[in-house]
Image (cartoon, rainbow, N blue to C red):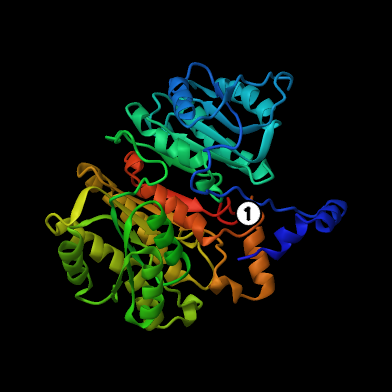
Amino acid sequence: MSDWYRDFANSGVGGTLTKQLGLPRPAVLRRYEPGEPLLPGPAVIGSAEEGRLREQLSSVLKDAGVSVLSPVAADGSGDGEKLAAVLLDATGLTGPADLAAVHDFLAPALKRLRPSARVLVLADPPSAAPSPAEAAARQALDGLVRSIGKELRNGATANLIYVPAGAEGSIASPVRFFLSGRSAYVDGQTVTLAGADVPAGEDDDKPLAGKVAVVTGAARGIGASIARVMARDGAHVVAVDIPMAGQSLADVANEIGGTAFQLDITAADAAPRLIEHLRERHAGVDIVVHNAGITRDKLLVNMDAERWNSVMAVNLQAQLDITQALLDADGVLKAGARIVCVTSQSGISGNRGQTNYSASKAGIIGMVRAWAPTFAQRGATINAVAPGFIVTEMTAKMPFGTREVGSRLNSMQQGGLPVDVAETIAWLSQPGSAGVNGQVVRVCGQSLIGA
């Protein structure tokens, strides 16, 4: 959907007017297109003290055909070429004094950024630090990166990856995601990796080739976009939605060459029916995306039991029941399976009039974190994606003022698109993302509310 203000601000007359009035100018974001290069220009890699990942980062960029330049001098002199990405290996930090080296590398490099550039910092997790001083330095990077994300302009993003010892082999997929156009609306986020068996030789254009993916709530909106991106990346999609949405569901399935499966996920026989279908028609499932969700908004003091119970049943209990059934069903959930649950920014920050919805979405986060060790034991993963303000047919019906405030209060100064959520889910579904488990990734343009 078109963003009238962004389009106006980037037009000839609009650009001049917004500059004269000091108004924000939302960027046209760099989003992924199949076959495009990882980055539209060169990158620079730096280290804070003696990091252990620089050689590996160089290898990832080299394999992607990215030119790596020498770090920019502290005074801003040196190679004047604009940078598409700045990567910092901060795994050498031992205390707060070492953060000066982080500043000395990043400050001049950020002056050289192209539009829609990427800033990516990699560090050891604070939880594994041998001393309070080292934990403080590692945790400081979280505040640093989130602040950088709010300072950057022109569609640039900043994100942080914590890489514990033993997880070095897991970095390639998240590094490529955060540098690519797939992460256009992912900003100010922190992901902690784990050691995992990451398959070699993944097809960058069709990373989900040969996979069977279930997407619930696939008849429209974000769910339909998830189904399309999954199919684009090579998966056969089993598109699931309620019978009432049957025609729209069939249209989506036919468009992507997938399978439509009408199912009320809250029904008592929902999990057995889905499992039977997957076993008989597809010999199991590789990816399950729990996207289906509803809202029944009301202030808590005025909320009736039906509103509360229906939201809990669809948004939370159905995810619990279906996931448990898949774990229990012999041979249905394939080796290396991926479960991705759609939560919400409301589940992190709360929202007036949405106690039921926010509670259900926060519950999803608890579920994902609790199940992560179980999935790791099976060589599988479970993660959550938390959308912020995403422009859909539903948001288009909001009052103009409410819609504009919701879409502008983030570092990107614009609402996200359904494809932004879909790209993040597709990344978490890839075989190469085996080291990403029990994580919650917000797709919110680094919202200034509940940030």
Instruction: Judge left or right: residue 5 versus residue 93.
Output: right
Instruction: State the residue in front, 317 or 59.
Output: 59
Q: Position of residue 159 (x, y in %)?
A: 53, 40
Q: Position of residue 384 (x, y in %)?
A: 39, 54
Q: Position of residue 17 (x, y in %)?
A: 86, 56
> In terms of depth relative to the viewer, which is nearer, 347 or 62?
62
Does 187 appear above or below 241? Answer: above
- Residue lying furthest right: 20
Quadrant in which the N terminus appears: bottom right
Q: Residue 167: which quarter of the image?
A: top left
- Residue at 34% from the left image edge and 47% from the top image edge: 438
User: Can you give x and y, in whole percent of width and height, for residue 183 in the image?
Assistant: 52, 47
Q: Amino acid at mark 1?
A: Asn
Q: Nearer the viewer, residue 278 or 129?
A: 278
> Residue at label 1?
410
Nearer-the-camera pick, 49 or 217? 217
Q: Residues within 10 Å of mark 1 (few under 14, many from 20)?
A: many
